[in-house]
Amino acid sequence: MFKSLYSGVSGLSANLTKLDVIGNNIANSNTVGFKSGRVTFNEMLTQTLKTASRPVAGGLGGTNPQQIGLGTQVASIDSNFNQGNFETTGKKTDLAIQGPGFFILSDGNSRSFSRAGVFGLDSQHKLVNPSTGLKVQGRMADDMGNISTGPLTDLVIDPGLVVPAQPSTTVELMGNLDSSSDAKGTIMESPSFLAAAEGGDLLVDMSGESNGILDMNSGDAVRINGRVGGVALTDETFTISETSTYQDLVDWLNGAMSTAGQNITFALDSTGSLEVTNNTGSTLEGLSLTATAKTQFNNNFSFSSSIANGSVDMSSELRAYATSDDLLSAMYDSNGNALDIDLSSPPAQLNIGGSVGGNPVENQAMFVDATTTLADFATELQYAMNINSQPVEINDWGQVIVRGEVGTSATIADISISEEGQLNSVLESAYSFTETQEAKDKKTFSMSTIVYDSLGGEHTVNFNFEKIAGENEWIWDADLDANENIVNGGSGRIRFADNGSISNFTFDDDSGVMTFQPQGGVGDGASNVTLNIDYGQIGQLTGLTQFEGTGTLQSMADGYGTGNLVDFNIDQSGIITGIFSNDTMQTIGQIGMATFSNADGLIRAANNTYSLSGNSGQAVETFAGIGNGVTLVPGALETSNVDLAKEFTNLVVAQRAFQANSRVVTTADQVMQELVNLIR
């Protein structure tokens, strides 16, 4: 009887403990980083009334033991270290742990551990839990941003932290240098001039007496039309090639007539006409040369409708592109119109006008007689335009090409040719020059960058580039705004390949680097600055290139001046990175983490912290993000992992168990009362 009474009492005690744990879980459902607890029960001592017996061979079988339990007891109160959810706060010093780690906190004498990453800075700029003052432990970085080794210590984020200057060592040059940067002179071209066609002139380049070029092309076929005594002359054709000359056509005509047995001969006249002689003994009717769809050719190679025996007839006068040896007085414009220079009382006078470098050219008089050639005119024009470097030339298309001296100061414009005392519109129009290249001065290119000396002083280095005329080569030099002394490597040359890539970069003094000595101002007392010049890869289109057209040139240098801490941030590995006023970032420290072989063995302490126990194992000091499954989530907090629905269910179960155990005690009490009443 008394066993049931004690069993009920033990049940009341055990379930009351469970109610206490559930109540604590519910109370901390909004506590940052809180880990819920649970209670497990064990049966207490058991009284054996009868032991078990084993079977007897050939007799009775075995019997089971008879035992009465003596109640229950609390077996364990465990912590549930399952991951909690994350709550975003946006505060950079709030940190949530993903994984099994713990923050390491110190009060100056002992350490504790916590999952609650509610941190801030105190008046000494230490990273602490602001509600308890416990200091976050980690490792600080040295002046170069390298995390130190050794024991963990307090993390300090000093707003007065200064990052030392880093002197520049490399300057990177990038961009395109315009390949057309040479100084250029004016180029002007006249229309084509024509002269009487000769035997050596190409048929594909010939023009008619009027209306310009014949428009004959390689592959066009020429046919002879005509009849003698009502019989066609021949059905042969002459196929034109790129190299067919006027004389080739004449030779073919004479050969065709000989083959046909016709005493008809063709010859070239000094005017460029095709001359035909009929000695057939009959009248030659309807003679012409034709090519399909070549109206200009057909019109110029037609003859009289009938040519009597013993008579001679002429085609139109054919023209070809003039050469330097052609007589000026016997030339034609591009439409076949005679220049018509008046040589009735030679010599005639041509006036050459224009401007050079914006200054008018005095009318240069040129006298023309029956021996004056187009080459003579070119010489006079060269003299009038003050050209010394290269002659005025006549190209294969009969054009007069004027190439002026380089630079805008020698710009040639408004070339005009007129005949003294005559209104010669054909001549003036024929010499209407067109500008095909504008005069330009030599281009130079520059780029600048700021470099730093060992004391953080700023120095502006300017790189200047000037192209060598007619070459894929540039001269470069460097200077500094404050006229600092360049010790070596201040000039050199760059050569580019035909594909625009850099092929060679040299220094005039073969130093291979540029060195200058800081002078005055912030740089006073600083050591010399030596710069490697990174111009790109040889043979690659990186760094500097040379193509036609402008491009953005820029240069960048490494190094930086002294900087003060203006801000900081914390990443997923717990690395605290400072942001400095010189636009650099440097590691300040790293937050330490702890892991345990048995985290369930930790002892809960006040303020959401834990301490070591004999069964937790020693803290393994580590850092987040090194393959241990621990990472940090900056700007967030881990919420409590309490499941309220589950806790309320457990609360009901514990309540009912407590009530049931109280009924056991009450019933046992009533039975004892009845037993006492037996003696009444």
Image (tube, helix red, strand yellow):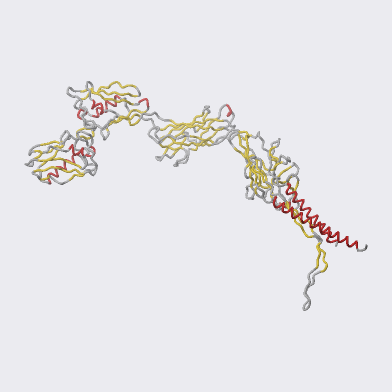
Which residue is nearer to you in this view: 197 or 370? 197
Please say if 126 is above or below 72.
above
Report the residue at 30% width, 31% height from top.
Answer: 189
- From the image, which quarter does the C terminus lie in? bottom right
Q: How many marks?
A: 0
Residue 662 sits in which quadrant? bottom right
Examine the rendering and report whether any part of residue 616 can be seen: no
- From the image, which quarter does the N terminus lie in? bottom right
Which residue is nearer to you in this view: 307 or 446? 307
* Residue 62, position as x, y percentages in the image: 78, 73
Q: Is residue 262 left or right of residue 296?
A: left
* Residue 363, position as x, y percentages in the image: 28, 21
**What residue occupies the far right of the structure in this picture?**
680
**What residue occupies the far front of the structure in this picture?**
680
Q: Is residue 327 left or right of residue 25?
A: left
* Residue 160, position as x, y percentages in the image: 66, 33
Q: Is residue 519 left or right of residue 335?
A: right
Q: Is residue 149 left or right of residue 231?
A: right
Please say if 543 is above or below 377.
below
Report the residue at 32% width, 27% height from top.
Answer: 388
* Residue 435, position as x, y percentages in the image: 32, 30
Which residue is nearer to you in this view: 551 or 307? 307
Residue 289 sits in which quadrant? top left
**What residue occupies the far bottom of the structure in this picture?**
58
Examine the rendering and report whether any part of residue 469 can be seen: yes
